[in-house]
Image: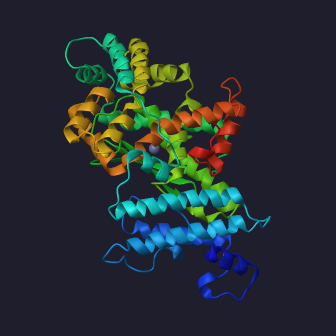
């Protein structure tokens, strides 16, 4: 309390000690950015993107011993400074801006603690890092879906191998990946451009990479430029073309980052958004809107038609296979929450590695090798998995409650743009 009173007094006096100097939200934002960049020295995955001033990057080499307590203290200190501002009753204080920054600070502190060796349960982590509450599903829910899949896929034997065999006819040969992705991306971009004003210089570079735990990644570079990487460790099926074009590109991560950059950093000068910490509430909206973005550009039957009439012919897949392919894909997408249940059990120590891999094969229909890759993703990114499924569904719900209607595309895109241009988190989405 004493600290708060001192700080309050300091808001009105210019003669405070340097230690308790006057803070406004912009100085807190700058300190926060510097802190995120400092934490990034110890874990390269922390800073997903940074497009702020070069001089805010740490000038010193990282310490030989991880400065856990100093970093936790700095995050707490900035959080408290935000609270002081909130309690100042100053009419110029933007409460929602501070509250969002405080959520980002809670996530940063949590990530620092985790780098320092602290473990949280799956659900604690989801709340602290992503401001989210993942639901619980009984496995029987997924078992019923697997029964339906069993009816759809021919042959005997384990369902996941039958699924893998079925999907083999939809693999994009490596020499055609570029053509397929270019066509899919051009379409996603053209549709997005119909509804959003994109800067003329906006662009992305596509790279093919190997040996990653993910299948695709967007690195926003600032100035409306992105580097999109696609992992070719495993065969890429034709449905991934639209997923990647829309999720990584238009109107997914590339557009989200561009709009945050334009609207929050450039226009409003909210510098806290010049850094994008991966393990933070922003990722819930980023992954959720990127997955929902697929439906923005390819709603309902449009996706089926585009894949069947445009993409299948490039690869030489018969159009007759489209209906069943979509039925299988639709059913498979209903299994997505199984990943949360597997990750929850595994990360909470309820099941071991072998069981987790077995469950990934069974419930996500992955091949044994791909299941190992997915477990590596879960081990690396932990409760991040909720951002793809729960994030998508909460964004969809927010859009619906905000009046989005697929019959009124202009209005729908307007609502989507508002969501991507402002600092939302899971708990501030309409529910
Ligand atoms: Zn993503």
Q: Position of residue 140 (x, y in %)?
A: 36, 22
- Let me know if residue 198 appears in the view: yes
Residue 385 is left or right of residue 261, and the answer is: left
Instruction: Kindly identify the residue that appears in the image at 64 percent across and 44 percent down.
Output: 419
The image's colouring method is: rainbow
Q: Quadrant of residue 237?
A: top left
Foreground residue among 111 and 173: 111
What residue occupies the far front of the structure in this picture? 1
Is 404 located above or below residue 14 in the figure? above
Instruction: Kindly identify the residue that appears in the image at 45 percent across and 47 percent down.
Output: 126
Instruction: Kindly identify the residue that appears in the image at 69 percent across and 64 percent down.
Output: 86
What residue occupies the far right of the structure in this picture? 91
Which image quarter holds the N terminus?
bottom right
Which image quarter holds the C terminus?
top right
Q: Quadrant of residue 296?
A: top right
Q: Position of residue 132 (x, y in %)?
A: 51, 45
Foreground residue among 378 and 240: 378
What is the total number of numbered labels drawn onto the structure image?
0
- Rendering quadrant holding ligand 1: top left
Residue 361 is left or right of residue 214, and the answer is: left
- Let me know if residue 182 appears in the view: no
Is 120 located above or below residue 29 in the figure? above
Is 151 located above or below residue 48 in the figure? above
Q: Position of residue 73 (x, y in %)?
A: 48, 72
Instruction: Kindly identify the residue that appears in the image at 31 percent across and 14 percent down.
Output: 150
Residue 82 is left or right of residue 124, and the answer is: right
Is 183 located above or below residue 29 in the figure? above
Foreground residue among 89 and 102: 89
Q: Position of residue 6 (x, y in %)?
A: 66, 79
């Amino acid at each position: 309390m004493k600290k708060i009173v001192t700080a309050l007094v300091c808001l009105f006096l210019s003669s405070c000690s340097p230690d308790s100097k006057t803070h406004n939200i912009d100085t807190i934002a700058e300190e926060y950015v510097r802190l995120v960049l400092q934490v990034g020295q110890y874990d390269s995955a922390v800073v997903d993107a940074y497009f702020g001033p070069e001089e805010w990057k740490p000038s010193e080499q990282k310490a030989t011993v991880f400065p856990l307590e100093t970093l936790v203290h700095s995050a707490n200190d900035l959080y408290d400074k935000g609270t002081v501002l909130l309690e100042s009753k100053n009419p110029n204080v933007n409460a929602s801006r501070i509250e969002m920054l405080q959520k980002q600070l809670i996530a940063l502190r949590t990530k620092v603690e985790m780098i320092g060796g602290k473990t949280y349960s799956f659900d604690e982590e989801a709340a602290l890092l992503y401001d989210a509450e993942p639901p619980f599903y009984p496995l029987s829910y997924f078992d019923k879906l697997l029964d339906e899949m069993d009816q759809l896929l021919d042959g005997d034997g384990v369902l996941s191998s039958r699924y893998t065999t079925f999907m083999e006819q939809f693999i994009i040969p490596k020499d055609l990946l570029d053509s397929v992705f270019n066509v899919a991306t051009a379409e996603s971009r053209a549709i997005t451009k119909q509804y959003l004003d994109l800067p003329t210089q906006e662009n992305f570079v596509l790279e093919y990479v190997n040996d990653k735990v993910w299948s695709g990644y967007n690195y926003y570079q600032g100035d409306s430029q992105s580097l999109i990487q696609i992992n070719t460790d495993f065969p890429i099926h034709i449905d991934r073309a639209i997923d990647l074009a829309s999720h990584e590109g238009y109107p997914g991560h590339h557009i989200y980052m561009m709009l945050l950059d334009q609207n929050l950093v450039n226009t409003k000068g909210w510098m806290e958004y010049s850094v994008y910490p991966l393990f933070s509430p922003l990722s819930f909206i980023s992954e959720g809107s990127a997955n929902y973005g697929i439906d923005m550009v390819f709603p309902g039957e449009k996706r089926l038609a585009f894949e069947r009439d445009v993409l299948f012919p490039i690869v030489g897949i018969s159009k007759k296979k489209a209906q069943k392919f979509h039925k299988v894909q639709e059913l498979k997408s209903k299994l997505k929450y199984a990943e949360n249940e597997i990750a929850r059990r595994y990360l909470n120590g309820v099941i071991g590695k072998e069981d987790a891999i077995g469950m990934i094969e069974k419930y996500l229909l992955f091949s044994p090798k791909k299941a190992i890759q997915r477990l590596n993703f879960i081990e690396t990114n932990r409760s991040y998995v909720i951002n793809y499924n729960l994030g998508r569904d909460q964004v969809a719900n927010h859009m619906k409650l905000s009046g989005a209607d697929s019959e009124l595309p202009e209005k729908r895109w307007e609502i989507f743009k508002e969501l991507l241009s402002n600092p939302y988190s899971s708990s501030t989405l309409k529910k």
